[in-house]
Image (spheres, rainbow, N blue to C red):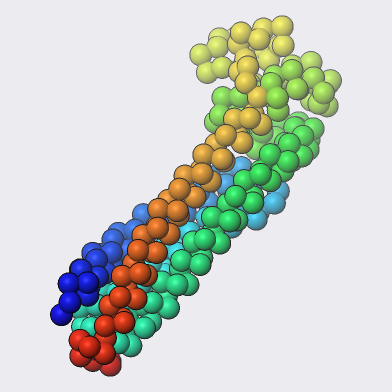
Amino acid sequence: MGIGSCTSKACLIFISLIFLVAAAALAYVGINAIITYKQYENFLGNMYVMLPSVIILCVAVFMFIIGCLGFCSTIQESSCGLGCFITLISIILAAGVASLVLGLVYKDKINPELEKNMDLLFQKYDAKNVESSTVDFIQEELQCCGIKNYTSWENTTWYRTNHTVPKSCCMKNATQCTGDLKEPGKLYNEGCEAKLENVLHKVLSFSMLIILGFVIIELICLISLCVVYHKRDYQGYEIL
């Protein structure tokens, strides 16, 4: 058996094991990203921004199947198994590239969606409806106040009626905070739009970085697989 073939087989066995571990890692990344998006879905409107995360989960399932198939096929030198292996690798490689493209496309669409939907939700705030709970949640979770900053509340129906901002704008350590804009030292000074956009961009960028890493691994695996598959006629592979 040639050195190139032996090296490629060893590489495939190693990468197959990595795929099994990577499947769990990608599943965690995908689920975590979806949970993050779901927390702020009212601010996003366009649910297509979750497509990269959904693709990550699909890729995780394929990677688990590929890991098992690749390990068994490489050990047994099965021509049929290696043929399926190379087909699945090609599919998952294409899915990874598609996910990267979608991530780049929808990354630029997050800000317009946020700006439009946040304005609608803040205008509907009355401290009672579902929209109000969403606004309070994001202000407390991200420690922010208003869309751009706490003065953004001056343009809302809530402020024109109550002349205060919601209590969720009050800093956690602030005592006797009434939400009065004359006491800005007791309120969060940063706006929620920039903070939320930053959170979503971080999640999306991290997901894209993980996908890029595995796309590179899959490409190396595909090259190694082609070398092994090319040698099948000379190494006596059994057709299973």
Q: Quadrant of residue 50?
A: bottom right
Where residue 26 sits in the image (x, y, percent)?
Answer: 40, 56
The answer to whether residue 186 is seen in the rendering is yes
* Residue drawn at the location 54% of the way across and 58% of the way down: 99
In this rendering, the answer to whether 157 lies above or below 221 is above
In this rendering, the answer to whether 7 lies above or below 204 is below
* Residue drawn at the location 65% of the way across and 24% of the way down: 191
| Left-right relation of 196 to 120 | left
Where residue 221 sits in the image (x, y, percent)?
Answer: 34, 67
| Left-right relation of 15 to 2 | right
Q: Quadrant of residue 65?
A: bottom left
Q: Nearer the viewer, residue 90 or 59?
A: 90
The answer to whether residue 28 is seen in the rendering is no
| Left-right relation of 32 to 224 | right
Q: Nearer the viewer, residue 80 or 9?
A: 9
Q: How many marks?
A: 0
* Residue drawn at the location 31% of the way across and 70% of the way down: 224
Where residue 29 sits in the image (x, y, percent)?
Answer: 43, 51
* Residue drawn at the location 21% of the way across and 83% of the way down: 76
User: In the rendered view of the protein, which quadrant contains the N terminus?
Assistant: bottom left
User: In the rendered view of the protein, which quadrant contains the C terminus?
Assistant: bottom left
Where residue 238 sits in the image (x, y, percent)?
Answer: 23, 91
- Considering every residue shown, the one lying at the far bottom of the view is 239
- Considering every residue shown, the one lying at the far left of the view is 1
Q: Nearer the viewer, residue 20 or 157?
A: 20
